[in-house]
Image (cartoon, rainbow, N blue to C red):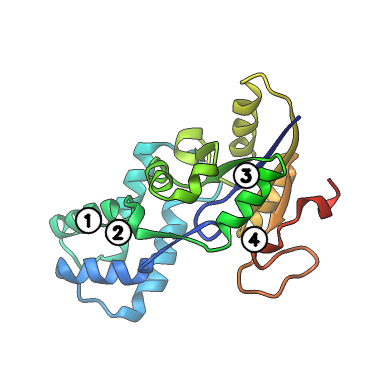
Amino acid sequence: MSRWVLFDAVGTVIYPEPSVANIYLEVGRRHGWSAAEDDLPQRFSAAMSEQFVAGSASDENSDYQSWRRVVQQVMLELPDESSSAAFMELWDHFARPSSWRVYLDVGPCWQRLAEQGYQLAIASNFDRRLVGIAAGHAEFSQVQRVFVSSQLGWSKPDPRFYRTILDELRGTGEHVDEFWMVGDDYRRDVQAAVESGIDAVWLRRDIPPSENSIASLEQLDLASNGQ
């Protein structure tokens, strides 16, 4: 019997430290950017929405260029040369394992699931940098596979994201008897997974648990979800 649990990455098992906002401000200032700090959240959100359309096709080069345009839009006062330099510094920063922290509840949760016979995988709208990030954290030694949208060809919530993962696992000849997705984004990690025939758990960190969600991976109990 083969049983798999997929986990989203950012916001579910890892988070940036320092924060994205702090790093953008630090790098931007170093390259001559002097926009108001209060403008950053709105600019970043708008740039992300424009450059990373939910459910779009994905590959390494297009993701790389999309991140370049995000930096250009956020730091629009910078000349092209300075913007490009800031982008490269940010790209390299977020590729380093030391720029990310693993939530404290991840390791114990994964150990518990492994003892119950589950195989673990990451399923993220990220690029190949995530593979290096995972390799730099001991907790990820418990993970069998790392799936990223830029290598799968589709980003969440496109159902082809999940179907490609299923096809890859089944292509090894194993029969998948139980399949779960755990993530913090309802549309991408829960609704899209369910629509693809995968059971899902919604993680809402720091929010009191409700009937349809958990607030911590300490509360993840797949047996109580009807399996």
Residue plotted at (66% across, 24% down) = 170
Q: Which mark is residue 89?
A: 1
Q: Given the current orientation, which residue lies at the most extreme right position?
A: 226
Q: Nearer the viewer, residue 76 or 163?
A: 163
Question: Which of disc 3 and disc 4 is earlier in sequence?
Answer: 3
**Identity of the amino acid at label 1?**
Glu
| Amino acid type, mark 2 | Val
Secondary structure category for the residue under label 2: helix
Horizontal relation, residue 139 to residue 162: left or right: left
The residue that mark 3 highlights is: 6
Which of disc 2 and disc 4 is earlier in sequence?
Answer: 2
**Which of the 4 quarters of the picture holds residue 167?**
top right
* Nearer-N-terminus badge (3/2): 3
**Residue topped by disc 2:** 71
Residue 117 falls left or right of residue 63 = right
**Neighbourhood count class around disc 2 (C-alpha, 10 Å): few under 14, some 14–19, many 20 upward:** many
Dots 3, 1 in contact, CB < 8 A = no
As drawn, 26 above or below 169: below
Location of residue 166 in the rendering, given as x and y in whole percent from the top left corner:
65, 31
Image quarter of the N terminus: top right
Disc 4 marks which amino acid? Leu
